[in-house]
Amino acid sequence: MKITVDELLSFKGKIYLIDIRDQESYDKDHIPGAKNISSSELIYHPSLYLDYHNTYYIYCDIGYISEDVCRKLSMRGYHVISIIGGYQNYLLKK
């Protein structure tokens, strides 16, 4: 499942937002409220970061890696949504 940046920015209240880019990119800038967790950590140890009762919005730099991560996590029963165009699309919208 996917969502646009506009849809994401229209949400009110708390959401679970995960930035899977490298730490250096995250430290330079990120979408406000995002937590930085590497894609490999999410894929190999999802139970350390996710639960089955919440929905998580995941983004990478341009959206391809987050789509793959979401597909893998979804197959394991997690509610995850990839942000179309990732962080680069967010920069165009902010």
Image (cartoon, rainbow, N blue to C red):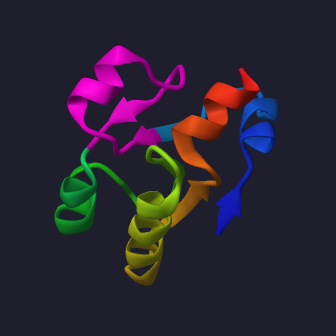
Find residue 78 and report its horizontal and vertical position in percent.
Answer: 45, 68
The answer to which image quadrant residue 6 occupies is: top right
**79 left or right, relative to 4:** left
Find residue 81 and report its horizontal and vertical position in percent.
Answer: 58, 59
Residue drawn at (39%, 71%), measured in percent from left and top?
A: 73
Residue 17 painted magenta: no
Residue most extreme to the top: 28
Could you say which is closer to the camera, residue 43 or residue 87? 87
Q: Is residue 47 at all visible to an observer of this figure?
A: no
The answer to which image quadrant residue 41 occupies is: bottom left
Residue drawn at (65%, 54%), measured in percent from left and top?
A: 84
37 vs 2: above or below: above
92 vs 32: above or below: below
- How many marks the image carries: the answer is 0
Q: Quadrant of the N terminus?
A: bottom right
17 vs 33: above or below: below
Residue 36 painted magenta: yes
Residue drawn at (50%, 23%), measured in percent from left and top?
A: 33
**21 left or right, relative to 66:** left
Could you say which is closer to the camera, residue 88 or residue 12? 88
Residue drawn at (55%, 45%), measured in percent from left and top?
A: 86
Q: Is residue 58 at all visible to an observer of this figure?
A: yes
Magenta residues (range):
18-37
Find residue 71 and report its horizontal and vertical position in percent.
Answer: 47, 76
Find residue 32 and report its horizontal and vertical position in percent.
Answer: 53, 20
Q: Quadrant of the C terminus?
A: top right
